[in-house]
Image: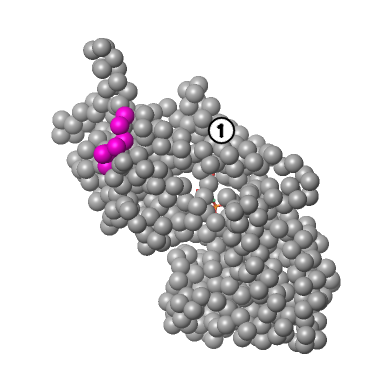
Amino acid sequence: MKISVIGAGYVGLTTAACLAQIGHDVFCAESDSDKLSKLQSGVMPLFEPHLEKVIEIARKAARLHFGSAGEAIDWGRAIFICVGTPPLANGDADLSAIEGVARAIAKRASGYRLVIEKSTVPVQTGAQLSRYLSVLSTNGLDYDVASNPEFLREGSAVEDFLHPDRIVVGVNSARAAQLLREIYEPVIAQEFTCPVHSDCPKCKDPVFLVTDTSSAELIKHASNSFLAMKISFINMVADLCEAVGADVTKVAQGMGLDPRIGPAFLNPGIGFGGFCFPKDVQAFIRIAEKSRCDFSLLREVDKINQHRVKQFVEKIQGELWVVRGKKVAIWGLAFKPNTDDVRFAPAIALAKSLLDEGASVSAYDPVAAEKAKAVLPNITYCADAYQAAQGADAILIVTEWEEFRHLDWKRLLSMVEQPLVIDGRNMFSPEEISGHGFRYISVGRAGAVPSPTAVADGKEYRSAQADKDVQESLA
Ligand code: UGA
C-alpha cells in the first residue's frame, strides 16, 4: 500500500522504516530542513538500534522516500501523523503541529484518505481532527480518522514495531478498520524478513484490538501513566527499604512473582525520564481535570518522580559532606540505555543541581554526549568511563549502559580521589563493587563498605559520616 508518514522523529522514522520493511511503499515527511537533507543523503539524524539498517534496506529497495508534507499528502492513501506533541507550561499537550498537518491535508488532498493519529494525543483529538477536516476541506476530500497509538520504547523501537504485544486501532468506520488490518497484516501474521534477528523466533502472536477512537486514545495515556505509577510505587518502596534495612530487589522480586503484578517496571532508581512518561502523566492529569475527574493519584506519581533527583543529591551530600569544590563523575546522560535521547533525563537535572552546589562534573555517555552538550554546556565531556572517573570524589551511575558492567575496577580504584560509587540504577550487587575496594551506595538496599583486603595502594576510605563521627568525638 502507498503510505505516508508525517514527522521523522523516533516514532515517525521507525514507523516509516518498518512499514517499508513489511512491504509497503512509504513516503516520510520532515519539516526540519537540516534533518530532511540528512535523511535524503542516508545520514541518521538520531540513534536507535537497528533503524539505520532497516532504512538502508528500504531505500535500496526504493520503498522509502523522504520529502515535504505536501508530497506526503499527495502520496499516501493512509497518512500517519507522527509529529511532536510537547508539553505546554500548564501540562497540556501542544497540538499545534497536529493542527498544522490537518490543515495541510484538508487544503491539499482530494479523493479518499485514512488519517491516522499515531502521536500521543489527548482523548477526543480524533473527533476534533475529524471536525477540522470536514470544515476546512476544499478539494472534495473523503476521509476517515483513526487512532493507532504507538507502544515503541526508545532503544527497542524497531523490535517493538515488528514484534508487538498488541496493535490498537481506534476507528469510526469498518472501512478504516479494514485498511488498518491490511496495513498491519504482515506484522499480525509475523510474515516479513526480520532485520533484527537472523533466526527470527516469530514467537509473538500480536493481538489486533479494534476500539472506538476515544478508547484507543485513552489506552495510550492510561498505559504510560500506569507504568509510570509502577515506577513511582517501587521508588517509594525503595525509600521504605532504606529506612527499615530491607532489600528492594528482593521485595520487587517477591511482588513480581504474582502474575497479577508482574516483574516489569519494578526497578527503583533515580526516576523516570524521557519524552513520554513525564509529559504523558502531566497531560493525563490535565485531561482528567478538564473532564472534572480528580486523578490526584497521578499527581502523587509525578511528585514522587520529581523528588528522585533531589533525594539522590542528598545522598551525594551525605557521603561527600561538602560538595563545593569536589569532582564528580556522571556515567550515563541518556534517560535510559540504548538511546541518545536526553529529554527530561534525570542525568541532566542531576548535573545542573551539582553544578549549582559548586561541584565540577565530568560525564561520559556512549552515545548521548552530543545531544547533552546543547542543554548542558558547562560540564566536561569525556571519551570513556575511566576518563570521567579520573580524580573523582564520587562516581555516579545514572544510566545503566551495558558497557559499565565490563569495566576494570582495579584500574578505576587507582584513578579516583575517593573510592565511592553511588548507583542510581542498582546496576551491581553491593558485594561486587565493595569487593573491588569501593564504598557502594545504591537505591533501597543496604550500603556496602569495601572489604579491607580489597583496598588497593594503601588507599583508605572514610565516609563523610565517619569524618563527622571523628569530629564529634574530638568536640
Ligand atoms: C515508553 C513506553 O514504555 C512505551 O511503551 C511508549 O510507547 C513510549 O513511552 C511512548 O509513549 O512513546 P520510553 O519512554 O522509550 O517508552 O522508555 P521506557 O523504557 O518506558 O522507560 C521510561 C523511563 O522509566 C526511563 O527513564 C527508565 O529508566 C525508567 N524506568 C523504567 C525505571 O526507572 N524503572 C523501571 O522499572 C522501568
- Report the front residue among 10 and 353: 353
- Report the front residue among 475 and 406: 475
Residue 143: percent from left, percent from top: 79, 78
- Asked whether the viewer can see residue 410, the reply is no
Direction left: furthest residue: 457
Which residue is pictured at 27% across the width and 57% down the height?
383
Residue 112, by quadrant, is bottom right
In the picture provided, is 119 more to the left or to the right than 266?
right
Any magenta on residue 323?
yes
In the picture provided, is 243 more to the left or to the right than 437?
right
Which residue is pictured at 72% across the width and 52% down the height?
287
Q: Secondary structure at mark 1?
A: helix
Magenta stretch, residue numbers: 321-327
Any magenta on residue 445?
no
Q: Which residue is mark 1?
A: 236
Which color scheme did the rendering employ for the protein? one colour
